[in-house]
Image (cartoon, rainbow, N blue to C red):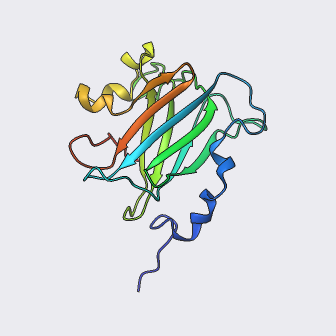
Amino acid sequence: MAIATASQTIGPYWHLIEDPTWSDLTRFGAQGDVIEITGTITDGAGASVADAAVEIFQSTPAADDSFPGLGRARTDAAGRFLFRTIKPGPVPGPAPRLGNVPQAPHVAIVIHARGLLRALATRIYFDGEPLNETDPILSLIDDPAARRTLLALGTGPASWHLDISLQGDNETVFMEV
């Protein structure tokens, strides 16, 4: 008989998304350009994923006592999530395989949900960011329509929105980890 482990199910860790303060990466007094990132998660049929755990990770600004660099939220009944964070900056490129071309500002995102035996990982890039054109990871996606599935759209001066589709015609590009 196989026993489920942490990499196989969110099960025993579900309580970790019950604290809504985890979705605010500025809660310890982080300084910088504060932004909100919102989104929705849908399944292959277009239905809302109402019980996902969503995690974000940032390389910039660097994590410290005032900025954890990691956030966690749950989706609501409509599949929506919200994070408050500091707008990330560019980071060094992944060398040597892809050169040292700087990566565009982005946020890594991981989704855990019922029915997923492994978490899904992707990135949130910011539409209109000049470095998107040369980002070594984003450039690996040949299809322009698929590449757009990673671009959050500005919905206000400090607000960004990205819809994530787990399957189907508008499936978000996910990355191997």
Q: Tell me the quarter of the picture where residue 172 sits.
A: top left
Q: Nearer the viewer, residue 76 or 73?
A: 76
Q: Residue at the spot x=45%, y=18% of the render?
A: 101
- Count of all numbered marks drawn on residues in the image: 0
From the viewer's perspective, tell me whether residue 149 is left or right of residue 5: left
| Location of residue 9 with respect to 33 vertically, above or below | below
Q: Nearer the viewer, residue 7 or 114?
A: 114
Residue farthest along the top direction in this orientation: 130
Residue farthest along the front direction in this orientation: 77
Q: Tell me the quarter of the picture where residue 31 sits.
A: top right
Judge whether residue 134 can be spotted in this image.
Answer: no
From the viewer's perspective, tell me whether residue 54 is left or right of residue 42: right
Quarter occupied by the N terminus = bottom left
| Location of residue 117 with respect to 176 vertically, above or below | below
Q: Residue at the spot x=52%, y=67% of the render?
A: 6
Q: Residue at the spot x=32%, y=28% of the render?
A: 148
x and y percentages locating residue 91 in the rendered image? 54, 24
| Location of residue 3 with respect to 28 vertically, above or below | below
From the viewer's perspective, tell me whether residue 32 is left or right of residue 53: right
| Location of residue 27 with respect to 20 vertically, above or below | above
x and y percentages locating residue 94 in the rendered image? 46, 29
Judge whether residue 120 can be spotted in this image.
Answer: yes
Q: Residue at the spot x=54%, y=21% of the render?
A: 90
x and y percentages locating residue 114 in the rendered image? 41, 64
x and y percentages locating residue 76 in the rendered image? 50, 53
